Amino acid sequence: MTQPTLIDGKAIAATVRDEIGRRASELLASTGKRPGLAVVLVGEDPASEVYVRSKDRTANELGFHSVKHTLPASTGESHLLELIGTLNDDPDIHGILVQLPLPSHIDESKVLRLIKPEKDVDGFHPVNVGLLTSGEKDHALIPCTPHGSLILLKRTLGSDLSGLNAVVVGRSNIVGKPMASLLLQESCTVTVAHSRTKDLPDVIRAADIVVAAVGRPEMIRGDWIKRGATVIDVGINRLPAPEKGEGKTRLVGDVAFRECQSHVGAITPVPGGVGPMTIVMLMANTLTAARRQLGFPEDKPIF
Ligand SMILES: Nc1nc2c(c(=O)[nH]1)N[C@@H](CN(C=O)c1ccc(C(=O)N[C@@H](CCC(=O)O)C(=O)O)cc1)CN2
Ligand SMILES: [Mg+2]
């Protein structure tokens, strides 16, 4: 049994992060300014708290100006909108991120639409979505998880993905749809599969590239994946793990990892695959946003 290539998201994220650090230092030397990031968390979801802490810490480690706004779950929508307005007007803040999900009494799309598109480092504003889907991605801010996933694919398969059959499983605004747009722009033949797709195993069996973003633990079985395919598992599902002790949990992806090992070409682990890329691409977007706002846009996108 040949071992598949394990796509090491942690190691690849570290190289991207080094490059961001270098470019942030250059920016500081030429403008006296640091990229500024504001991260907003509403509520006490433990996973969101971990992600927000990690974003704030990474920004600080890179020498960015970083502010964290932690608001109680009872925060009213108008209060959150007011905070976004203040951050939109703050010249030291180049990137604004509102951690999702928001509490159910807040209209998520209303909040995301208020963020200035040039500060929308999540790439969720309709202006950025439009730029990405209309083939103007060099002027957009691209959602972090799909952008990071594309970098993992290119580091694994090389920069030319044209003609490959890609199946994206999941049609969310934050992963599935932007991932499909990115792969289409790489001239892949793209299929977006979802909960209503007929004969899902057979659809996936045709794929050279599988991007799994369904949010259902190990839903995609090993025998659905063709020999030699590259698998990007975006799923992060926390399951009880009593074998590790009382109350303990373990993380699994959307793909049954062990069933794939005998025949896939390359696969991302969970954890340690796509997750670390999400955080680092947020830093890349913050740097890009800062350069544009300070009048130093890159000649071409950094990544
Ligand atoms: N505003 C946003 N909200 C959310 C996003 C997003 O991109 N923007 N994505 C997810 C959560 N997320 C970042 O916010 C995120 C998820 C996972 C990881 C990560 O590094 N995962 C690790 C495992 C971590 C663990 O042990 O729990 C890994 O996969 O190795 C980073 C960021 C939803 N919300
Ligand atoms: Mg994400």
Image: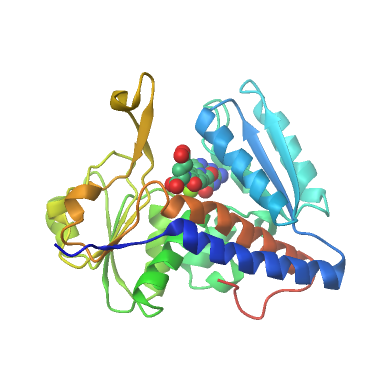
Q: Position of residue 11 (x, y in %)?
A: 48, 61
Q: Position of residue 260 (x, y in %)?
A: 19, 54
- Residue at 42%, 65% in the rendered image: 152
Q: Can residue 115 be seen in the rendering of this structure?
A: no
119 relative to 257 in the view: left or right: right
Q: Can residue 18 be seen in the rendering of this structure?
A: yes
Given residues 107 and 263, the one toward you in this image is 263
| 75 versus 152 height, above or below | above
Q: Position of residue 287 (x, y in %)?
A: 68, 63
- Residue at 37%, 47% in the rendered image: 270
Question: In which quadrant is the C terminus drawn?
Answer: bottom right
- Residue at 38%, 54% in the rendered image: 176
Question: In which quadrant is the N terminus drawn?
Answer: bottom left
- Residue at 71%, 35% in the rendered image: 69
71 relative to 269 in the view: left or right: right
Quadrant in which residue 126 is drawn: bottom right
Please say which color scheme the image uses.
Answer: rainbow
Task: Report how many numbered discs are placed on residues in the image.
Answer: 0
